[in-house]
Image (tube, helix red, strand yellow):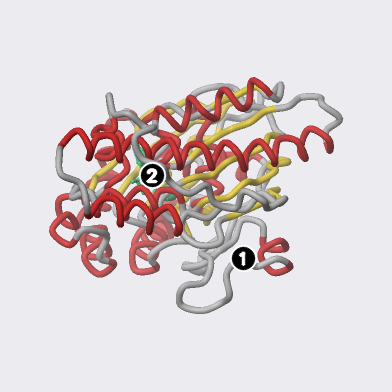
Amino acid sequence: MTQPHTVLGLETSCDETAAAVVRLTDGRAEVLSSVVGSQIAAHAPYGGVVPEIAARAHVESIDAIAAEALQQAGLGYGDLTGVAATAGPGLVGGVMVGLSFGKAVALARGLPLVAVNHLEGHAVSARLGAEVPYPFLLLLVSGGHCQLLAVDGVGACRRLGSTIDDAAGEAFDKIAKTLGLPYPGGPALEKLAQGGDASRFELPRMLLGRKDCDFSFSGLKTAAARLAEGLTSEAERRDLAAAVQAAIARQLAERSDRAMQAYAHEHEGRGLRFVVAGGVAANGAVRARLQETAAARGFAFTAPPLAYCTDNAAMIALAGAERLALGLTDALDAAARPRWPLDAAAAVANPTHPAGRKGAKA
Ligand code: KG4
Ligand code: ZN
């Protein structure tokens, strides 16, 4: 047995202040604690995340949340073997809070620091609930990201496709808003869609003719907004929510299916695994549709436990522990990065967004 790694993870890149302790022993992860402080109430009046409010809220709660994570794990700082903090991509004011806190702990306790890419956290999140050996094909679907990646090992990702406009979670959130639902829209829309008839409304199928693995949700958003204006009954609202959810799930499944074919070809049909991660992986219809698609293509299917789909620090601690196990650590001057593609090479060679204010976060 090799030495276990017991890592404090910190996550502050969006609107959750989270801390967790994860122990990694011979490749097996055990979550000793996972505390998530949600800022939903603080942002709800604005209908979305306000970066300045988020950064301040992280400052106010990070120390208490980290202390609670250690207490729930029954450990003190002296029991840790490393600290992992999200260093990007995300809202930089918030990222700096968690990263600075992590650096302070590392410095004060003489612990190694790992500056974790938030997306790498999502990529390993399924490993918090099941053994998921590398390599695997990953669909990462959250509020800020929508991409298909071949994950060959720790920190080794190749991007096969990504969104050319909105992320899937962003589409859920924006369409939910036009249906009068509260932020965050994804879970609210899923609830409204229960029992709805997805066939009452026809919604456009995006990128049908395209042979790549990219995504697009803006046409769906426009069509749904137009339909939402003319709704007259609660039953119609429910049916439109069901239609939107089905349309998003269908597109995610169709593009994943394309990626599965390419991936299966590359791997000569052996050891095929498909993993979905990120906030949208919490959606039951999305999970079911992807599971069917994976089964039809001969892929094993894994989704993270529900608590680890949306942002959390257990996934950051695990990503950090996996890096520590390989001796990969970061210096105390590691920078907070608002944009930080997982697959830097693909992002440069094949940018789906131009650089600039609205450029791809991933
Ligand atoms: O992974 P996450 O917590 O944050 C990012 O890294 O972006 O994902 C949040 C996104 C939001 O857009 C939220 O509406 C969506 O995930 N989401 C859902 C569900 N739960 C969260 N979308 C659809 N159905 C859900 N049940
Ligand atoms: Zn996330």
In this view, the residue in front, 290 or 111, is 290
**Amino acid at pointer 1:** Thr
Q: How many marks?
A: 2
Image height check: is 101 above or below 238?
below
Tell whether circle 2 marks a residue whose Cβ is less than 8 angstroms from ligand 1.
yes
Secondary-structure class at tag 1: loop
Image location (x, y in percent) of residue 188: 24, 39
**Amino acid at pointer 2:** Asp
User: Is 114 positioned to the left or the right of 348 in the image?
Assistant: left
Q: Residue at x 51, y 28 (%)?
A: 289
Quadrant (top left, top right, bottom left, bottom right) of the N terminus: top right
Question: Ligand 1 quadrant?
Answer: top left
Tell whether circle 1 marks a residue whose Cβ is less than 8 angstroms from ligand 1.
no
Image location (x, y in percent) of residue 139: 57, 41
Image location (x, y in percent) of residue 136: 68, 34
Q: Which mark sits nearer the N-terminus, 1 or 2?
A: 2
Residue position marked by numbered label 2 in the rendering: 311
C-alpha span from label 1 to label 2: 24 Å
- The numbered mark at residue 352 is 1
Residue 172 shows in the view: yes
Image location (x, y in percent) of residue 209: 67, 51
Secondary-structure class at tag 2: loop
